[in-house]
Amino acid sequence: QERLVESGGGLVQPGGSLRLSCAPSGSIFGIRTMGWYRQAPGKERELVATIANAGDTNYADSVKGRFTISRDNAKNTVYLQMNNLKPADTAVYYCNAEVFTGYYWGKGTLVTVSS
């Protein structure tokens, strides 16, 4: 079920930065872990980073040290700061929110890293 809206994607040169944001399109109660996933052309969707309510974070090895996930619990908003971007980071990035009854997803935002 898509009730999240991502923003901040675009075209950036290798080594550049982007900041993705994700917020609910309506009221969502009981959000627990929030996260970012991505899907590159011809590949399966993969985990990028997650953040729990208390702030505990988890990152894919491929983005450690370059990406930072954060959240604003008052706004149910999650962010992904992406630095030192590489062409391999090119993908559609999806926001995810875990609630007690399942998961919500966004429609995705495209990030293209190219010179």
Image (cartoon, rainbow, N blue to C red):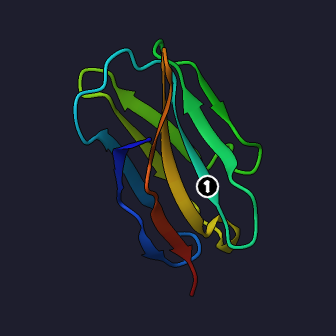
In the rendered image, the vertical position of residue 38 relative to residue 57, given as above or below = below
Seen at 41% across and 20% down, the residue is 31
Residue 30, picture quadrant: top left
Which of these two is toward me, 17 or 107? 107
Seen at 65% across and 69% down, the residue is 86
In the rendered image, the vertical position of residue 90 relative to residue 101, given as above or below = below
Seen at 48% across and 68% down, the residue is 110
Q: Viewed as shown, does residue 7 lie left or right of 1?
A: left
Which of these two is toward me, 115 or 22? 22
Q: Viewed as shown, does residue 10 lie left or right of 92?
A: left
Residue 14, picture quadrant: bottom right
Seen at 60% across and 38% down, the residue is 49
Q: Quadrant of the N terminus?
A: top left
Residue 23, picture quadrant: top left
Q: Tell me which amino acid carries mark 1.
A: Arg
**Percent x, y of residue 93:** 53, 56
Which of these two is toward me, 62 or 3? 3
Residue that mark 1 sits on? 38
**Percent x, y of residue 72:** 31, 27
**Percent x, y of residue 38:** 61, 55
**Secondary structure of residue under mark 1:** strand
